[in-house]
Image (cartoon, rainbow, N blue to C red):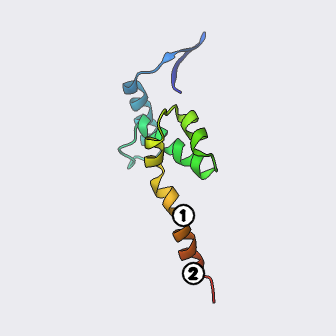
Protein backbone atom coordinates (compact mmCIF):
# COMPACT_ATOMS: atom_id res chain seq x y z
CA UNK A 1 0.00 0.00 0.00
CA UNK A 2 2.82 2.38 0.85
CA UNK A 3 5.88 2.75 -1.35
CA UNK A 4 8.69 5.22 -1.79
CA UNK A 5 8.02 7.85 -4.44
CA UNK A 6 10.61 9.53 -6.57
CA UNK A 7 10.72 11.43 -9.84
CA UNK A 8 11.10 8.14 -11.66
CA UNK A 9 7.89 6.77 -10.08
CA UNK A 10 7.00 4.33 -7.36
CA UNK A 11 9.77 2.35 -5.73
CA UNK A 12 9.95 -0.48 -3.23
CA UNK A 13 7.51 -0.95 -0.39
CA UNK A 14 8.19 1.12 2.70
CA UNK A 15 9.33 -0.59 5.86
CA UNK A 16 6.87 -0.86 8.76
CA UNK A 17 8.96 1.70 10.69
CA UNK A 18 8.78 4.17 7.79
CA UNK A 19 5.00 3.74 7.52
CA UNK A 20 4.68 4.28 11.29
CA UNK A 21 6.66 7.53 11.06
CA UNK A 22 4.45 8.81 8.22
CA UNK A 23 1.24 7.90 10.06
CA UNK A 24 2.47 9.46 13.31
CA UNK A 25 3.48 12.65 11.51
CA UNK A 26 0.19 12.95 9.59
CA UNK A 27 -2.04 12.20 12.58
CA UNK A 28 -0.01 14.59 14.73
CA UNK A 29 -0.41 17.35 12.15
CA UNK A 30 -4.16 16.72 11.93
CA UNK A 31 -4.64 16.51 15.70
CA UNK A 32 -1.76 17.08 18.12
CA UNK A 33 -3.64 15.04 20.74
CA UNK A 34 -3.86 11.97 18.47
CA UNK A 35 -1.51 9.29 19.75
CA UNK A 36 -1.20 5.56 19.24
CA UNK A 37 -1.88 5.40 15.50
CA UNK A 38 0.17 3.13 13.26
CA UNK A 39 0.11 1.48 9.88
CA UNK A 40 -1.85 -1.29 11.58
CA UNK A 41 -4.51 1.29 12.52
CA UNK A 42 -5.01 1.92 8.81
CA UNK A 43 -5.45 -1.80 8.16
CA UNK A 44 -8.06 -2.12 10.92
CA UNK A 45 -9.84 1.06 9.83
CA UNK A 46 -9.96 -0.08 6.21
CA UNK A 47 -11.49 -3.40 7.28
CA UNK A 48 -14.14 -1.55 9.29
CA UNK A 49 -14.89 0.86 6.44
CA UNK A 50 -15.26 -2.00 3.97
CA UNK A 51 -17.69 -3.83 6.27
CA UNK A 52 -19.68 -0.63 6.84
CA UNK A 53 -19.88 -0.23 3.05
CA UNK A 54 -21.42 -3.70 2.77
CA UNK A 55 -18.43 -5.70 1.53
CA UNK A 56 -18.84 -9.40 2.37
CA UNK A 57 -16.22 -11.42 4.24
CA UNK A 58 -14.59 -12.99 1.15
CA UNK A 59 -14.23 -9.53 -0.41
CA UNK A 60 -12.86 -8.15 2.84
CA UNK A 61 -10.35 -10.99 3.09
CA UNK A 62 -9.20 -10.41 -0.48
CA UNK A 63 -8.84 -6.65 0.02
CA UNK A 64 -6.83 -7.10 3.23
CA UNK A 65 -4.88 -10.10 1.93
CA UNK A 66 -6.03 -12.31 4.80
CA UNK A 67 -5.99 -16.07 4.25
CA UNK A 68 -8.13 -16.70 7.33
CA UNK A 69 -11.34 -14.94 8.44
CA UNK A 70 -10.13 -14.73 12.05
CA UNK A 71 -8.50 -11.27 12.01
CA UNK A 72 -11.04 -9.41 9.84
CA UNK A 73 -13.78 -10.89 12.02
CA UNK A 74 -11.99 -9.67 15.15
CA UNK A 75 -11.46 -6.19 13.71
CA UNK A 76 -15.16 -5.94 12.93
CA UNK A 77 -16.71 -7.46 16.08
CA UNK A 78 -18.01 -4.12 17.31
CA UNK A 79 -19.55 -3.14 13.97
CA UNK A 80 -21.19 -6.54 13.52
CA UNK A 81 -22.66 -6.31 17.02
CA UNK A 82 -24.12 -2.88 16.24
CA UNK A 83 -25.75 -4.32 13.10
CA UNK A 84 -26.96 -7.55 14.71
CA UNK A 85 -30.57 -8.58 15.16
CA UNK A 86 -30.68 -7.80 18.87
CA UNK A 87 -29.22 -4.34 18.29
CA UNK A 88 -31.79 -3.61 15.58
CA UNK A 89 -34.66 -4.80 17.78
CA UNK A 90 -33.37 -2.73 20.67
CA UNK A 91 -33.10 0.43 18.53
CA UNK A 92 -36.54 -0.16 17.04
CA UNK A 93 -38.10 -0.79 20.45
CA UNK A 94 -37.78 2.85 21.49
CA UNK A 95 -39.48 4.04 18.30
CA UNK A 96 -42.68 1.99 18.69
CA UNK A 97 -45.64 3.37 20.53
Picture mark count: 2
Q: Position of residue 57 (x, y in %)?
A: 57, 44
| Residue 16 screen position, x and y as percent | 39, 26
Asked if residue 90 is positioned above or below residue 22 in the image, the reply reads below
Q: Is residue 49 left or right of residue 67?
A: right
Residue nearest the observer in this picture, 28 or 58:
58
- Residue underneath mark 1: 84
In-front residue for pair 48/87: 87
* Crowdedness near tag 1: few (<14), some (14–19) or many (≥20) residues, C-alpha within 10 Å: few
Q: Which residue appears farthest toward the bottom when viewing the image?
A: 97
Q: Which mark is residue 93?
A: 2
Q: Is residue 34 above or below residue 1?
A: below
Secondary element at tag 2: helix
Q: Residue at coordinates 46% horizontally, 57% vertically from top-left?
A: 78
Residue 18 at x, y percent in the picture: 40, 25
How busy is the neighbourhood of tag 2: few (under 14 within 10 Å), some, or many (20 plus)? few
Query: Which residue shows up at 52% across the image and 63% down it?
Result: 82
Q: Residue at x 62, y 82 (%)?
A: 95
Q: Could you tell me which secondary element the residue under label 1 belongs to?
A: loop
- The quarter of the image holding the C terminus is bottom right
Amino acid sequence: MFCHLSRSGAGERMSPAAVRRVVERCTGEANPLAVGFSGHSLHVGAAQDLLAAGVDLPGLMQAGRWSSPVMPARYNEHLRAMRGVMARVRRGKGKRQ
